[in-house]
């Protein structure tokens, strides 16, 4: 059964990554930056649990917050363009994040072993689940609880006034702007929420794979 539980874990994490793009798609934008936010969440959450000894949930929450802040910062310049140019701009951001972590080296000594990110060799020693006695089933259940919470949140967004505004911008920007909707604010807020969701997925990914 562990194989199927592991498969469910993979599906759950990639579901989070897909959901992170959904809210941006509602505004009519196509972004390839989600992998960058995913990586930020993975590294931040893993560093907090491995190097600082944090519990998993607060570490993922901080990773999500940082992912949201970076997404907000990226959104302001990137979302002033659209179409193919936006795709290229967000792809460039993702590649920039990849190169940053590929060269990121921050290790501390713990006994005779150094732990932490080591550039191109990746980040090993992420052992939160096995060290705390989590079974494969419990990890799978944890992931899917988060997936369900995120899906419920997006369902609520979709049926709220905020969701109506997102869809209005996605369907006709000119009409939305004519009734007083701030296009930049709406698009950036969608990018920010998407960045937070992707970072949550990244934080979980780092801990169930144990190496990023």
Image (cartoon, grey):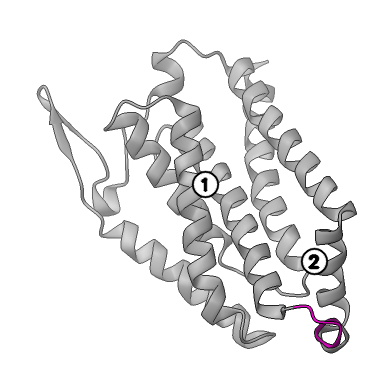
Instruction: Answer whether residue 177 is magenta in the image.
Output: yes
Q: CA distance from mark 2 to mark 1?
A: 21 Å
Location of mark 2 (residue): 26
Looking at the image, residue 169 lies above or below residue 46: below
Q: Residue furthest top?
A: 133
Judging by the rendered image, the residue that carries numbered circle 1 is: 64
User: Mark 2, residues whose alpha carbon is within 10 Å: few (<14), some, or many (≥20)?
Assistant: many
Q: Residue furthest left?
A: 112
Q: Position of residue 139 (x, y in %)?
A: 59, 22
- Residue appearing at x 21%, y 51% in the figure: 105
Horizontal relation, residue 74 to residue 11: left or right: left
Task: List x then y, in percent, for residue 146.
Answer: 67, 33
Please tell me whether mark 2 sits on a helix, a strand or a loop.
loop
Q: Which mark is residue 207?
A: none
In terms of depth relative to the viewer, which is nearer, 43 or 135? 43
Q: Is residue 54 above or below residue 175?
A: above
Which residue occupies 86% across, 82% down?
A: 179
Instruction: Specify whether 101 is left or right of 209.
Output: left
> For residue 9, what is the image quadrant?
top right
Q: Could you say where residue 41 lies in the image, as x and y percent from the top left? A: 47, 47
Question: Is residue 212 shown to the viewer in this render?
Answer: no
Whole-percent x, y for residue 16 in the image: 66, 45
Is residue 30 covered in magenta?
no
Q: Which part of the image, by quadrant, shows the C terminus?
A: top left
Residue visible at 25% across and 39% down in the picture: 116
Magenta range is 176-181
Quadrant including the N terminus: top right
């Amino acid at each position: 059964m562990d194989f199927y539980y592991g498969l469910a874990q993979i599906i759950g994490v990639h579901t989070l990554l897909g959901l992170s793009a959904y809210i941006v798609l509602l505004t009519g934008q196509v972004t390839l930056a989600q992998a960058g936010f995913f990586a930020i969440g993975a590294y931040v959450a893993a560093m907090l649990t491995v190097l600082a000894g944090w519990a998993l949930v607060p570490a993922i929450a901080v990773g999500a917050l940082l992912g949201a802040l970076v997404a907000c910062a990226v959104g302001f310049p990137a979302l002033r363009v659209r179409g193919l140019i936006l795709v290229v701009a967000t792809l460039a951001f993702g590649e920039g994040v990849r190169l940053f972590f590929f060269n990121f080296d921050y290790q501390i000594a713990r006994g005779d072993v150094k732990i932490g990110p080591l550039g191109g060799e990746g980040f090993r020693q992420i052992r939160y689940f096995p060290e705390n006695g989590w079974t494969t089933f419990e990890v799978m259940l944890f992931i899917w609880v988060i997936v369900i919470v995120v899906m419920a949140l997006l369902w609520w967004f979709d049926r709220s006034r905020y969701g109506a505004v997102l869809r209005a911008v996605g369907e006709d920007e000119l009409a939305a702007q004519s009734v007083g909707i701030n296009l930049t604010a709406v698009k950036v807020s969608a990018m920010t929420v998407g960045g937070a969701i992707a970072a949550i997925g990244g934080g979980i990914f780092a801990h169930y794979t144990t190496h990023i």
